[in-house]
Image (tube, grey):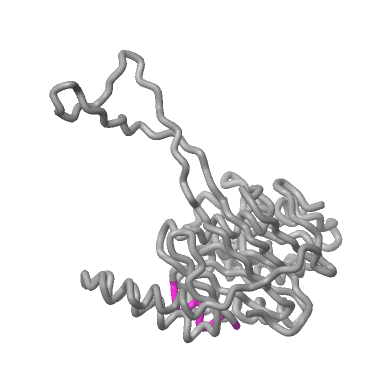
Amino acid sequence: MYAEGSPCVAVDRVAMRYRVASTELPVQTNTRGHLWLSRRRSPRSNLVTVKALNELSLVVGRGESLGVIGRNGSGKSTLMKLVSGQIRPSSGAVYASSTPIMLGVNAALVPDLSGDQNVVLGCLAMGLSRDEIDHSFDTIVELSGLEKSIHLPMKSYSSGMSSRLRFAIAASVDPEILLVDEALNTGDAQFADRSKRRMDELREKAGCVLLVSHSVETITEMCTRAIWLDKGDLIMDGPPQKVTKAYRDFTRHLSKGNNVSASKILEESRANLVVTEVMERVPGLRKSEANGHA
């Protein structure tokens, strides 16, 4: 499902596989039928295939804020890297109407520099002119909530303070497509209110936001739609309240050891999923390539 507005992002039958080294030794059987581990004087790592993301398709329309939830290792960050163009999918293709801005990637900051110097550096890295930076500076600092600390070295910031500064910089350029990966879970209620207002502004300007979070509260409060990933599979796609409720029930049963009940919720949610069909050439979108956009 997606909004009636024209699409900003289209993920077409995308899958991601990694070939990584494993130190696990192969198990063999000797002539006496006993198991033994094959060992060499110079052991070499075995290459194994890791399925980070199984084939999925989805479209994110203008004016949408899409929340992405799931357990660790479910493929959330992999999906964000694919959409941002950091990595190339093993199969399928990603299309975008403009270059997505990945929070914490385009705004690469330097710990030894002060907060205000990092604002300038991050904005320059995203293509803003000095005049544009001067015009936006006060707004960025206000959004970050770091007025009292903006002249201190960033290495003196807490992780929450650093996340707030990165979000404020990334959101300063009015990106059409903004990707946020766990950066809003700072425990700061005032910042949560400010960042939600900023995300609403971006959506109202015909943009879209993709937000990864472990917090179901963040997803329900800040998103108009949510998807649930589990072990690389797309399980559910729909209204945030409905998706987060199913996910919360699933994790609650798992935590209590009720694996059968948890599996039932997972399979029922997957069975009700309507698979998105993406046209080979999506009007208004360009194919996203690794390390850049065509």
- Residue sitting nearer the eye, 158 or 249: 249
Q: Is residue 291 left or right of residue 19?
A: right
- Residue sitting nearer the eye, 63 or 50: 50
Q: Which quarter of the figure has residue 252? A: bottom left
Q: Residue furthest top?
A: 41
Q: Position of residue 139 (x, y in %)?
A: 71, 71
Q: At 60% across and 62% down in the image, what residue appears?
A: 165
Q: Position of residue 217 (x, y in %)?
A: 45, 80
Please indicate, yes or no, whether residue 164 appears anywhere in the rendered image. yes
Q: Is residue 61 left or right of residue 259?
A: right
- Residue sitting nearer the eye, 277 or 223: 277
Reply yes or no: does residue 220 show up in magenta.
yes
Tell me the quarter of the image containing the N terminus. bottom right
Q: Which portion, as a residue range, is magenta? A: 215-224
Q: At 20% across and 23% down in the image, what residue appears?
A: 30
Q: Is residue 113 above or below residue 242?
A: above
Q: Is residue 100 left or right of residue 267?
A: right
Q: Which quarter of the figure has residue 119? A: bottom right
Reply yes or no: does residue 291 show up in magenta.
no
